[in-house]
Image (cartoon, coloured by chain):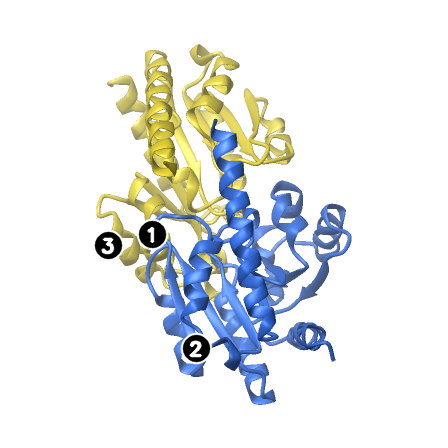
Chain colours: A blue, B yellow
Amino acid sequence: MKITVLDNILKANDAIAEEIRAELASHQVLAINLMSSPGAGKTTLLERTVEKVKPQGIRVGIIEGDIETTRDADRLKKFDVPIVQINTGSACHLDANMTKKAVANLDCSQIDILFIENVGNLVCPAEFKIGEDHKVMLLSVTEGDEKPLKYPLMFRESSAMIVNKVDLLQYTNFKMEEAEGNARKINPRLTIFPLSCTTGEGLDAWIDWLKKELEGKRGT
Amino acid sequence: MKITVLDNILKANDAIAEEIRAELASHQVLAINLMSSPGAGKTTLLERTVEKVKPQGIRVGIIEGDIETTRDADRLKKFDVPIVQINTGSACHLDANMTKKAVANLDCSQIDILFIENVGNLVCPAEFKIGEDHKVMLLSVTEGDEKPLKYPLMFRESSAMIVNKVDLLQYTNFKMEEAEGNARKINPRLTIFPLSCTTGEGLDAWIDWLKKELEGKRGT
């Protein structure tokens, strides 16, 4: 019975996610579902990304998913972009129902890229569609290069993987080729961006990818 | 309905967990449920811990919980201690049913401390009792000092928190007092061990705590 219930929940979730995706697409909004372990750097990546794309005229919107607190949203307020906070209470991931309510509180006609920062969790968020065009995951070098093999679903579901904190590479035993090889064993189509949100190294390739995806969304 | 199902699942789980705990107690086995985000250092802590306690005559047993692979168990084979691997398939945490099967494959009369390494996840494992005397969590300094406020349940449920990777403190903006303060706001009774599994700094306090808990278990 447990499996049936879960299956029905996922089907209902996917139907709502598809509604959200269609609504966002009608406004040519590119939606990115940002996922990772706690502390891999999702919010810092958003800070660095908004700093780069806002001066280029790209309008960002953000949905912040957290179990509790508004700390991440508070960090992003300085950018004066629309932010909606979701507090899940105890849920370990966002689902489409939560995102639907958040999207209803945004003026999508004023947004080019919508980032949805998921709850920090390398497992459960990967199971739930929330209306995104792409799932993008972060793996930080301090977590270890074998993680794709141990937590395969998120690596399989993601379009792109950001390998963050490369400024700390020299203090860890993380091997970039090993991480990339392990990730591509799980998902050969994965686009990989090694970068550091602290030094800025590698950020441009990520920004270029976002801009190309946004152009694709607009059909230009 | 979803909530009712979940509530029944948790109650059934807790009943099985209590059976396991009683079985382990009959052999005076101290059981530690080790939890953290992926990559915080659970397996490395086990390596350093076994290296310290085995020469002191303390007999260790290990249950390794992973979604996929036996990589962590493989790392621990060199110590020649009994290890049982649980692969959860897709489940993001261990539950009492899984642990019960694993414990049945161990000779508890030959074990003093049973470490159960949970799936790497800062959220879901905290909800499930699996027969442990203590939940012990790791937070690594690269994850950030605000994590207790954002993921409170695990900090609330744990008896002890290991703050790992203190050798990397100087390369991060992690403040130890801030982390300890945030954790104690959630759980004033939390015992905190800042340490580095790389340099060995701080390990002795953790080992002393384990030995004290083991003595308590034996009623000596």
Q: Which residue is mark 2?
A: A82
Asked whether A32 or B95 is in front, the reply is A32
What's the CA distance linking mark 1 and mark 3?
18 Å
Mark 3: amino acid: Lys
Which quarter of the figure has residue A153? top right
Mark 2: amino acid: Pro
Marks 2 & 3, CB-CB < 8 Å contact: no
Q: Which residue is mark 1?
A: A89
At 37% across and 34% down in the image, what residue appears?
Answer: B6
Q: Secondary structure at mark 2?
A: loop
Relative to B67, residue B133 above or below:
above
Residue A113 shows in the view: yes
Point out which mark residue B185 bears: 3
Image quarter of the N terminus of chain B: top left
At 45% across and 82% down in the image, what residue appears?
Answer: A79
Asked whether A96 or B135 is in front, the reply is A96
Callout in the foreground (2, 3) = 2
Task: Report the chain holding disc 2.
Answer: A
Residue A66: image location, x then y, percent: 40, 58
What's the CA distance linking mark 2 and mark 3?
31 Å
